[in-house]
Amino acid sequence: MLLLVLGALLLLFCSLDVWYFLRGAQVFIQAWFQPRIWDILAEQSIDGMVLPHDLDYMGHMNNSRYLRECDFARFHHYMRNGLFMASRKLGAKMVVGASTIRYRRSLAFREAFEIRTKVLGWDEKAFYLEQRFVSKADGFVSAVMLCRQNVVRCSPETIIEFVCKRKIECPEFPEDLKHWISFISASSQALRAESGLEEKNK
């Protein structure tokens, strides 16, 4: 019986990223029991630590782990400010449309950090967020990411009005975000032209 259970667990861990789903459940439960954040523009933070399975060959946090941790931090953020549950009730989905991360200093094994997430603004199709990895040792910003969270089957403004029960004015985009959005737009246009989609739409 024990061998059967161990075999089933081995098959499960080989077939699925079990730790990902366990971490997601942990973040959900953590956010569920924390106080609600009523200001959707407020910065929120979630703690983390570099563990053995986060390491690369250099003994630093693997590049891909930063993106994964950002996923959990955004989910935690949306849970606490109500955007996640509102999107579910409205039948909307939020998917990452673009992200850019800048690494400034590596995070080492057992180094504690926090991810600070905030909504910078939105347009008719997406939310724009900034996420910072801040070392707890000295407050240094080790990495910073910009993320475009596309909203499917709804609009950011509709979700915000559902949460806040009133219209909220979008703050002015920071200059770096404006440049980043321009880059995304230019890249999209270039790829459409490269694939011939622009010709087909004429």
Image (tube, helix red, strand yellow):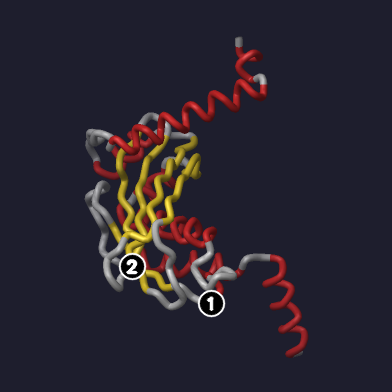
168 vs 72, left or right, is left
Residue 123 percent across, percent down from the top left: 36, 31
Q: Which residue is rendered at x = 25% and y = 43% of the image?
A: 164
Q: Residue furthest bottom?
A: 2
Look at the image and tell me whether residue 36 can be seen: yes
Q: Which label belongs to residue 135? A: 2
Name which residue type carries label 2. Ser
Q: Secondary structure at mark 2?
A: strand
Q: Which label belongs to residue 156? A: none
Residues 62 and 121: in front is 62
What is the quadrant of the C terminus in the image?
A: top right
What is the quadrant of the N terminus in the image?
A: bottom right
78 vs 40, left or right, is right
Residue 114 percent across, percent down from the top left: 34, 65
Residues 198 and 137: in front is 137
Residue at image mark 1: 52
Q: Which residue is rendered at x = 32% and y = 59% of the image?
A: 141
Q: Which residue is rendered at x = 36% and y = 53% of the image?
A: 131
